[in-house]
Image (tube, helix red, strand yellow):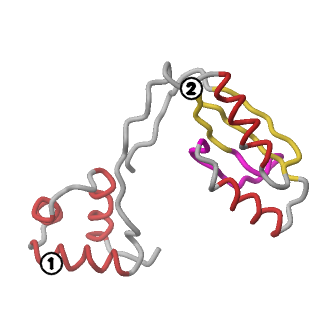
Amino acid sequence: MPSIDSTDARIVQLLRADGRMSNADLAATVGLSASACLRRLRLLERNGTIRGYTALVDEPDASEIMVAIVQVTLERQTEEFLQRFEAAVRKCPDVRECYLMTGLEDYILRVDARNAADYERIHNEQLSRLPGVHRIRSSFAIRSVVRARPR
């Protein structure tokens, strides 16, 4: 991320908390004119500090879904194996998150399923067919303690 001053950092912080904040409200909060604030905002977008905007959507209640944390170990950790796995896992519709890890496992995935039978389907039809997989270990969340929140 390019270096930014304290005003730009405040703009980013405010937009993380409310990406739909109007430019007029944003400008008033950071103490700029609307036109100066908009210029800064456009520059932050052009230089890649702000890469895009998204909607945070309420997730189903934990009683409605099973959250599986899936640890995946590959046969090898070569660039080719990593790239093939990552390209394939991006196409799995039930994988909500995927992280390349240090430590014993190569990847940690978050998978949401409706129930145990649905997870079995996901495991059989998607996870076990991913290229280069040596081992899959799954754990299931009991309840959410902390959820994603703006910084």
Residue 106 highlighted magenta (yes or no): yes
Q: Is residue 16 above or below residue 141?
A: below
- At which x and y percent is residue 54? 36, 55
The quarter holding residue 14 reads bottom left
Dot 1 falls on a residue whose secondary structure is helix
The residue positioned 44% from the left and 29% from the top of the image is: 60
In the figure, is residue 83 to the left or right of 65?
right
Disc 2 marks which residue? 114
Judged by depth in the image, the label closer to the viewer, 2 or 1, is 2
Q: Magenta segment, which residues?
A: 94-108
Task: Mark 2 or mark 1: name the one nearer the start of the chain.
Answer: 1
Dot 2 falls on a residue whose secondary structure is loop
Q: Is residue 130 above or below residue 12?
A: above
The quarter holding residue 44 reads bottom left
The residue positioned 75% from the left and 41% from the top of the image is: 71
- Residue 85 versus residue 69: which sits nearer the camera? 85
Marks counted in the figure total 2
> Separation of disc 2 and disc 1 at Cα?
48 Å
- At which x and y percent is residue 134? 89, 47
The residue positioned 63% from the left and 56% from the top of the image is: 90
The quarter holding residue 124 reads top right
Which class describes the residues within 10 Å of circle 1: few (<14), some (14-19), or many (20+)? few
Disc 1 marks which residue? 36
Residue 25 highlighted magenta (yes or no): no
The residue positioned 73% from the left and 36% from the top of the image is: 123
Residue type, numbered disc 1: Ala
In the figure, is residue 38 to the left or right of 6?
left
Dots 2, 1 in contact, CB < 8 A: no
Residue type, numbered disc 2: Arg
- At which x and y percent is residue 10? 28, 63
Which class describes the residues within 10 Å of circle 2: few (<14), some (14-19), or many (20+)? few
